[in-house]
Amino acid sequence: MKEKFEEILIKKEKELAYLKNNVQGFKSNGVLENRINRTKLNYRTKELTEEIKNIKSYLKRIDFVEKVRDYENNSRNS
């Protein structure tokens, strides 16, 4: 389960890097189409950043639960 979330995290980080490069590619020449595209990319970038943050937080919780489970198993075996 943890591996699946790590794979998703990697995909989202790659997509975020790609989008950040594209946002910088649009010049601020005032053309409405460029502004709209830049706004869409900025919104998706913020969305991805939040998703990545949530996945990292979830992975930390999974690690913590595994450590607690290991500790409980070790204390029972002692």
Image (cartoon, rainbow, N blue to C red):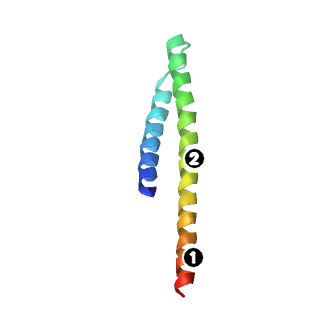
State left or right for residue 17 relative to residue 78.
Answer: left
Q: Secondary structure at mark 1?
A: helix
Q: Which residue is mark 1?
A: 72
Above or below for 25 versus 59: above
Q: Residue at x 57, y 82 (%)?
A: 75
Q: Residue at x 51, y 27 (%)?
A: 41
Q: Residue at x 48, y 38 (%)?
A: 16
Residue 47: image quadrant is top right
Q: Secondary structure at mark 2?
A: helix
Above or below for 3 versus 78: above
Sooner in the amino-acid sequence: mark 2 or mark 1: 2
Q: Which mark is residue 28?
A: none
Q: Which mark is residue 54?
A: 2
Q: In the image, what residue type sits under mark 2?
A: Asn
Q: Residue at x 53, y 31 (%)?
A: 44
Task: Tell which of 75 and 6 is nearer to you.
Answer: 75
Name, please, the residue furthest toward the bottom: 78
Residue 72: image quadrant is bottom right
Q: Residues within 10 Å of mark 1 (few under 14, many from 20)?
A: few
